[in-house]
Image (cartoon, rainbow, N blue to C red):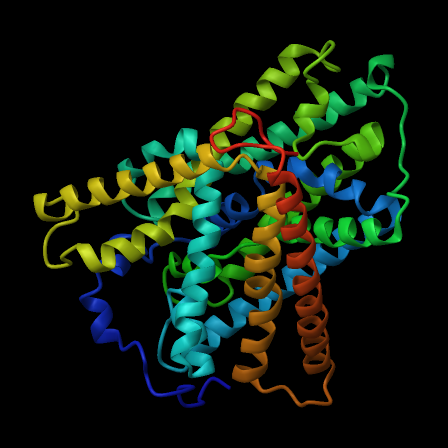
Amino acid sequence: MVNQPPITDDLFPYDDRQNDAGAAFVLQSKGEWWHAGFHLTTAIVGPTILTLPYAFSGLGWGLGIFCLTIMTVVTFYSYLLMSKVLDHCEKAGRRHIRFRELAADVLGSGWMFYFVIFIQTAINTGVGIGAILLAGQCIELPTFHSLRHVNLASLLLSLGYAFLVVTACIIAATRKEAGSRDYSLESSPKSRMFSAFTSISILAAIFGNGILPEIQATLAAPASGKMVKGLSMCYTVIFLTFYAIAVSGYWVFGNRATPNILQSLMPDTGPSLAPTWILGLAVIFVLLQLLAIALVYSQVAYEIMEKQSADVKKGLFSKRNLIPRIILRTMYMIMCGVSAAMLPFFGDISAVVGAIGFIPLDFVLPMLLYNITHKPPKSSITYCTNLAIIIVFTGVGIMGAFSSIRKLVLDAQKFKLFSNDVVD
């Protein structure tokens, strides 16, 4: 496999990359495996995990635990395959540093380049909107690799607020103000089906990572093997945080869980259900981590902008490059801010992005790319497993898109543009 010729004609030659300011200024390849672990954890383990109890409310205990476990296993497997595809391409003579280039090269189709860039842009802008209040400082950090220290702090913050939220849920369970626990699902079979697919789409959005090739691009060559260690670090954190919050939050609030479990712990009416200092510290940790998440997911947008606007022959902080960078990044964050103010549909948008964005990018393409590059025998377990995942999650994505868009349309009737309220 190592000595195989390149997959297709070289669509993205190395010489062109030497003149690519986006690659030179944003996707610098200097990192070690633990740096990849920091980046991966920040890209996946974020405040969206506070939505897990809400996702369980549409699935129930048994199906909720089952789907969470399946998502954990399948996403780890998917990202492992993606890393192997990237390793294969690197050994074949080229190192892809962007998801869109990898997909277009392996599939030999120009339209796939634009499909992936559209999905990535939608995902990254959506994440930027969610973290807008703290994202303004993005313009001060020039490269993805420079975020390694910020993302180490992000990893620790995610562990911190997960522990605090679980503690708060345990305390809330002892309070009579928490009310009775109801784990029943909706009575109508049709409503249960739509709720289940919406919940699965939310899970896909929580687990989704639309920038894995870009993260692997930050590693110093050779990158082979380093991503596996980084993924192992990331999924250790996932195991410690996802299950703890999902189980504790749903245990206490049942089908009354909100898209942000902190809202359930701090109801609009009545006292908080846990000590204020615990909840306040958790909120501070969440807000601080939003900064790191906004920085990570903005990098792809910045790389695209600077590929066209910057001059790689000039210095990174030269007047020629610095002024356009500040203007473009500021305009990008203003756009995210206006969008965030206009559309207060956090839970619903997470489901839509999960179904339309993360499912094809994280549950379909990696398996397809692996089957094409490594060509496992069609009778092998690997090939059949990959094909089964592609078929199942394509169906789940279609149903999830329909159900989540349906819920978004129904909720949209309740709110006006630039409303102060956020839709559950």
Residue 5, by quadrant, is bottom left
Is the residue 212 above or below the residue 274 in the image?
below
Image point (72%, 35%), residue name: 245
Quarter of the image with the C terminus in it: top right
Q: How many marks?
A: 0
Residue 423, by quadrant, is top right
Image point (82%, 35%), residue name: 255
Image point (38%, 78%), residue name: 110
Q: Position of residue 300 (x, y in %)?
A: 37, 54
On the picture, is 1 further left or further right than 376?
left
On the picture, is 364 further left or further right than 384?
left
Is the residue 155 above or below the residue 400 in the image?
above
| Residue 342 seen from this side | yes
Nearer to the camera, 306 or 141: 306
| Residue 149 seen from this side | no
Q: Position of residue 96 (x, y in %)?
A: 38, 70
Is the residue 275 above or below the residue 407 in the image?
above
Nearer to the camera, 165 or 216: 165
Image point (44%, 50%), residue name: 124
On the picture, is 352 further left or further right than 85?
right
Nearer to the camera, 55 or 105: 55
